[in-house]
Image (cartoon, helix red, strand yellow):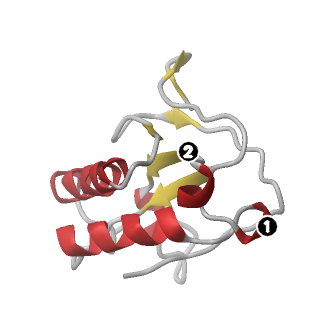
């Protein structure tokens, strides 16, 4: 993941890229629950989790997950929490993952990030709490 041609976060080998969107009713308890679920989710090879094999996670803040494109041609973002609410909750997910023993890389909140992904599988899940 790069910002202005500078690598700010990267993982190598098996692991998870986690796009975290925050909405208005999210809180720290949900952030901790999300981190525990991500750390223990058995979706890697041989039904292993990141905690089983020490796989790293790349956590990216992603307000666009809450984009609403049902009307018109331009998505609306009202379901996404504003930056001052969202940033501490994304940080809480990262902090809890690290507390659980995870190696976590991150992007830069609010930055124009270029994200590259090699999706092995592929598998994409939406987890809501």
Q: Determine crowd level at label 1: few under 14, some 14-19, many 20+ residues with C-alpha closer than 10 A.
A: few
- In the rendered structure, find residue 56 and report the number of the disc placed on it: 2
Q: Nearer the viewer, residue 33 or 125?
A: 33
Quarter holding residue 21? bottom left
Quarter holding residue 10? top right
Q: Position of residue 113 (x, y in %)?
A: 51, 35
Which mark sits nearer the N-terminus, 2 or 1?
1
Q: Determine crowd level at label 2: few under 14, some 14-19, many 20+ residues with C-alpha closer than 10 A.
A: many
Q: Nearer the viewer, residue 71 or 96?
A: 96
On the question of residue 27 being in view, the answer is no
- In the rendered structure, find residue 85 and report the number of the disc placed on it: none
State the residue at coordinates (21%, 79%): 25
Q: Secondary structure at mark 2?
A: loop
Q: Position of residue 64 (x, y in %)?
A: 47, 60
**58 displayed left or right of 53:** left
Q: Nearer the viewer, residue 72 or 112?
A: 112
Extreme-left residue of the structure: 84
State the residue at coordinates (27%, 75%): 30
Q: Secondary structure at mark 1?
A: helix
State the residue at coordinates (16%, 52%): 84
Q: Position of residue 49 (x, y in %)?
A: 61, 64
Q: Position of residue 78 (x, y in %)?
A: 31, 71
Quadrant occupied by the C terminus: bottom left
Disc 2, disc 1: CB below 8 Å? no
**37 displayed left or right of 73:** left
- In the rendered structure, find residue 46 and report the number of the disc placed on it: 1
**Mark 2–mark 1 distance (CA, rounded to whole Å):** 17 Å
**121 displayed left or right of 58:** right
On the question of residue 118 being in view, the answer is yes
Extreme-right residue of the structure: 121
Extreme-top residue of the structure: 5
**Position of 59 relative to 49 (above/below):** above
């Amino acid at each position: 993941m790069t910002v202005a041609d500078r690598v700010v976060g990267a993982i190598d080998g098996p692991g998870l890229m986690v796009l975290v969107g925050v909405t208005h009713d999210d809180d720290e308890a949900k952030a901790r629950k999300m981190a525990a679920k991500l750390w223990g989710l058995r979706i890697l090879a041989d039904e292993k989790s990141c905690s089983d094999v020490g796989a790293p996670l790349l956590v990216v803040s992603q307000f666009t997950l809450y984009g609403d494109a049902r009307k018109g041609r331009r998505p609306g973002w009202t379901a996404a929490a504003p930056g001052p609410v969202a940033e501490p909750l994304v940080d809480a997910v990262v902090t809890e993952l690290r507390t659980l023993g995870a190696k976590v890389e991150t992007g830069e909140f609010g930055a124009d990030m270029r994200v590259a992904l090699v999706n092995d599988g592929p598998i994409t899940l939406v987890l809501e709490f």
